[in-house]
């Protein structure tokens, strides 16, 4: 039986590493009760306001059940779909099973979690926010990442659809499209001078993206300060997508 408590509840998928870990840290620091969902264990297991669900987000029935059985806050509830995966291979070597895996993690799990979360908020009559962690790969193409690029484009479509369907129930749905952010996913780039140079030349400011930058954007989007923003994509990429250096 689910209950509503006085407070703020966040669900974060992909909570154990990189951007998701920074999101957990930021929302715990802001006073949220945080439920993290990740197939790996979390560094926050001992925190009193943190509950870990060690699960694969592509186990869709189990994912649905987490939201069915959860508690919801009366003030502000939040879902951040951050779990993600990608392939690196030319399209001619991209198998159907890898394509399906990338879509299952990046798109279908975000749909299942988003639908379940929004339905529960409507049932409880409480407001909330969904933030989907997309990517600049949802706005432009990139060599050797066909499934990833297509899946992140789909995430932006899903964001708009949920925003349309649940707006009247005071649920805002937005996406964040980060450029290159230093996490275990991208760590190898920072040890390869050519890759690092490519990143620096692809941006128009010298700062490199950190997981905390994404967390700051999520704090803003989920706050009342962003009350008029829904269905939108906040691009944070050091200028990666605004132009090319000739
Ligand atoms: N790092 C970047 O440069 C960057 C840029 C744009 C977008 N993103 C997106 O940000 C999100 C997080 O990326 P990151 O860089 O922090 O990666 P990461 O690899 O550091 O973390 C991803 C987390 O998701 C979890 N995860 C992956 N598949 C899962 C599954 N099936 N079930 C449960 N948990 C699963 C992993 O265990 C891990 O804890 C992804 O959606 C990624 O596409 C990252």
Image (cartoon, helix red, strand yellow):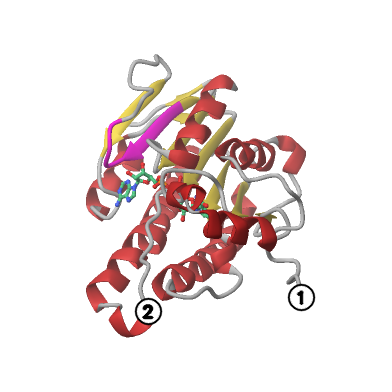
Q: To which quarter of the image does residue 72 belong? A: top left
Q: Where residue 77 sits: x, y (%)? A: 53, 35
> Is 163 within the magenta?
no
Residue drawn where x is 52% and y is 73% of the image: 142
Residue drawn where x is 48% and y is 75% of the image: 143
Q: To which quarter of the image does residue 226 belong? A: top right
Q: Secondary structure at mark 1?
A: loop
Please give the label number shown on residue 246: 1
What residue did someone put label 2 on?
Answer: 90
Q: Where residue 186 sits: x, y (%)? A: 46, 51
Between the C-alphas of marks 1 and 2, the distance is: 26 Å
Residue drawn where x is 59% and y is 29% of the image: 75
The image shows a total of numbered marks equal to: 2
> Is 40 within the magenta?
yes
Q: Quadrant of the C terminus?
A: bottom right
Of marks 1 and 2, the one in the foreground: 1
The residue positioned farthest toward the bottom in the image shown: 92
């Amino acid at each position: 039986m689910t209950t509503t408590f006085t407070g703020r509840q966040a669900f974060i998928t992909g909570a154990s590493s990189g951007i998701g870990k920074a999101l957990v840290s930021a929302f715990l620091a802001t006073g949220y009760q945080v439920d993290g969902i990740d197939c790996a264990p979390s560094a926050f297991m001992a925190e009193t306001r943190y509950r870990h669900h060690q699960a694969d987000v592509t186990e869709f029935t189990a994912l649905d059940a987490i939201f069915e059985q959860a508690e919801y806050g009366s003030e502000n509830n939040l879902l951040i779909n951050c779990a993600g995966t990608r392939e690196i291979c030319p399209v001619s070597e991209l198998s159907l099973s890898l394509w399906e895996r990338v879509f299952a993690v990046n798109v279908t799990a975000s749909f299942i979690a988003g639908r379940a979360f929004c339905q529960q908020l409507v049932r409880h009559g409480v407001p909330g926010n969904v933030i989907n962690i997309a990517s600049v790969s949802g706005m432009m193409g990139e060599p050797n990442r066909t499934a990833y690029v297509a899946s992140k484009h789909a995430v932006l479509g899903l964001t708009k659809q949920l925003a349309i369907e649940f707006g009247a129930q005071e649920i805002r749905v937005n996406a964040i499209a980060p450029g290159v952010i230093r996490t275990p996913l991208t760590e190898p780039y920072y040890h390869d001078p050519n890759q690092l140079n490519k990143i620096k030349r692809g941006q128009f400011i010298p700062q490199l993206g950190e997981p905390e930058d994404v967390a700051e954007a999520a704090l803003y989007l989920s706050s009342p300060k962003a009350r008029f923003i829904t269905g939108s994509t906040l691009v944070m990429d050091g200028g990666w997508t605004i132009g090319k250096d000739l």
